[in-house]
Image (spheres, rainbow, N blue to C red):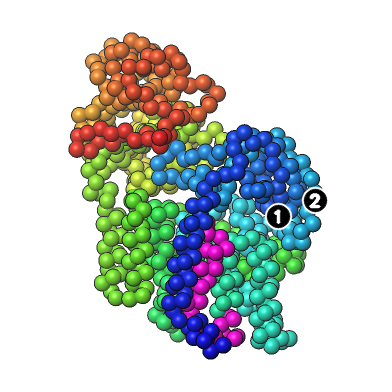
Amino acid sequence: MLRFRKLLLCKYLYYGILLFTILLSFLRIHLHTKSIYDSHTKEMIGVITKIQEKENQVTYEVKGQEKVLVKISSHPNYSLGDKVRVKGTFQIPEKNHTELLFDYQTYLKRKRIFYIVEADSITRIQKNHNILYQITNILQKRLHENPYLNTFILGDKSYLSKEAMRSFQENGISHLFAISGMHITLFASILQKIGKRFLKEEKRYQMISLILLFYLLLVGFSPSILRGVLFYILFQGNQVYYFYIQKEHLFLLSLSISLLIDPFSIWDTGFQYSYLISYSLLKMSNQLSSPSKFLSLGKVSLCSFITSIPITLYNYNQMNIMSIFYNCIFVPYVSIILFPSSFVVAIFPFLEPIYFELTTILEKTSIFLSHITWGKIIMKQIPTPFYFLYLGILLLYLNHPKKIIIYCFFFLLMMHWMIPLIDSTNYVEAIDVGQGDSILIHTNHKNVLMDTGGSYQKDDSLFYNTISPLLKKEGVGRIDALIITHGDFDHMGEAINLVNNFKVEKVIFNCGSYNDLENDLIKVLDKKKIPYYSCIKELNIDNKKLYFLQTKEYDNENDNSSVIYLNLNNYKFLFMGDASITTENEILKKYNLSNIDVLKVGHHGSRTSSGKEFINKIKPKYSIISVGANNKFKHPNKEALDNLSDSKIYRTDLNGSIMIKIKNNRLKIETCSP
């Protein structure tokens, strides 16, 4: 027994276990890179492990020999734990179409999901008899109407509004809405106080551990909940049974157990935040203590903020300094008021109106604060090894807290922030916005966005999933000029979202009268006091001129579309918007254009644009077609493609976003496609 205790006190044991676990985890991940299914699979049998309802579609996570996502438009009204037969088309999830952006295929692979099934039918073979699933089903039915009860009791954030979730993320407080160590500790403390009256310490520890394990099974083994439960069992058990193991070693043991249970959790952002911040608070505990609770909370918030910077920048390319102060407000509100009251309301439903008011205060305050731009710093995406360098410096500081180390960290951050000011690369990027146009021009550290695209799904997913994260990853925090080539939805549908979320210096409209979409945008511009102009002839952006070749007024939006010529480092660019052959003929009469290096093809390659005479005259070397995959207009048209056949054609539906870089007077084109 004495030898066993000595072994437990040996620090090398825990580092050895962790190293072995990490190596084993990467081996297990490597062995799970292939699916047992393929695109010829038509049927599977499995158990429903997760259900998500969204608008007119239901998504089931079904676990057979491996997990798949099953999508169906009709709701069969099945429950968790039901055994079902699924028939349908097995499809590999789509990869991202824009470099650096969120890759849904990789995301699902890290959850060991390789296929999405478009279901023709789902038939229940056997009803659920699993007690855990039965309890979860009862809870879900009870909590379904209130998204915050779902969040704080079941750990399911999917029912929170998109606007609220975005505000939590912008304010740096989204971690409060994942059940984590803080929530588990609070839950365990409540159970401790209740159990003190009836049970001795050892029995009380065993009872609470069993309750927490049951809760872990009930809500699923999410990394943050697993960490919280492991922390309680290991740290509290260390005190109860007098093992005298150092807290740091228990932390390493907890991390090892988490990776043994689920090696794929190493890719989970919640896992990364949870363990890194917990480690920093553990190592800095002496410096963070203070007689003043508010000062202590402020120190904890500052420490958590600094420690989380590498993960935040890698995932979101933006940090909000104000989140240090926001956490001092929201952490007590959520942990002391909202989280405990969630369980009270679940038991006593008549208190739900009061709970609704409490959550409304939280939501409205967060949304209001998210519109404050001061303190938000956008940082350009850099190669992954540099984020590990940030992480390494922080870990070094936590183990050897010398000022020179943290000074190096902030010096690197400053250099990172200055990259867009130092980099001399000019580029033009045709962003894949589906069936629409959006082109980013970066020249001499200035940014021009030509059109914003527009989602036909009538939501804001295009802006928040593509345009906004792309601009941030490019280090773009300010748009020096937003050009609306014309007022069609597929060219300006996201303009208001852009103006509301980024600093826009001015807006340029095309010739002709304003339509309803343009008037809606103008109302926002007037409110924000952003200047706007229409039917201009040229735009000067830091000694680079964009020439507007189409200034004649027609009776339709496409013919009125702005046509823009740009000479960038002696390379000629011509952006045609949705201009038709009528406009092309007018331009041929007015201007002597030839040997265009890059042509942004008019009207998505339709038969009404890219006339043979026009293309033969301008002789484009590269042709860029911005077009949606399998679009209902059947763009691009074969005749247009034939007319452009002497040029190298790039298409956003096939190549994804298209980056045209000019550095050292050499032009290079990069795409997402192989």
Q: Distance between the residues labelled 2 and 1?
A: 21 Å
- Left or right, residue 5 beside residue 319: right
Task: Name the residue located 56 percent from the left edge and 60 percent from the top edge.
Answer: 262
Quarter containing the N terminus: bottom right
Mark identifier at residue 405: none
State the count of labels: 2
Residue 594 location, quadrant: top left
Main SS class of the magenta portion in the image: helix
Query: How many other residues sit within 10 Å of disc 2, few (<14), some (14-19) or many (≥20)?
Result: some
Part of the protein shown in magenta: 236-265
Can you say whether 4 is above or below 444 in the image? Answer: below
Amino acid, disc 2 = Lys
What residue do we see at 56% from left, 58% from top?
363
Q: Quadrant of residue 597?
A: top left
Secondary structure at numbered mark 1: loop
Identify residue for label 1: 144
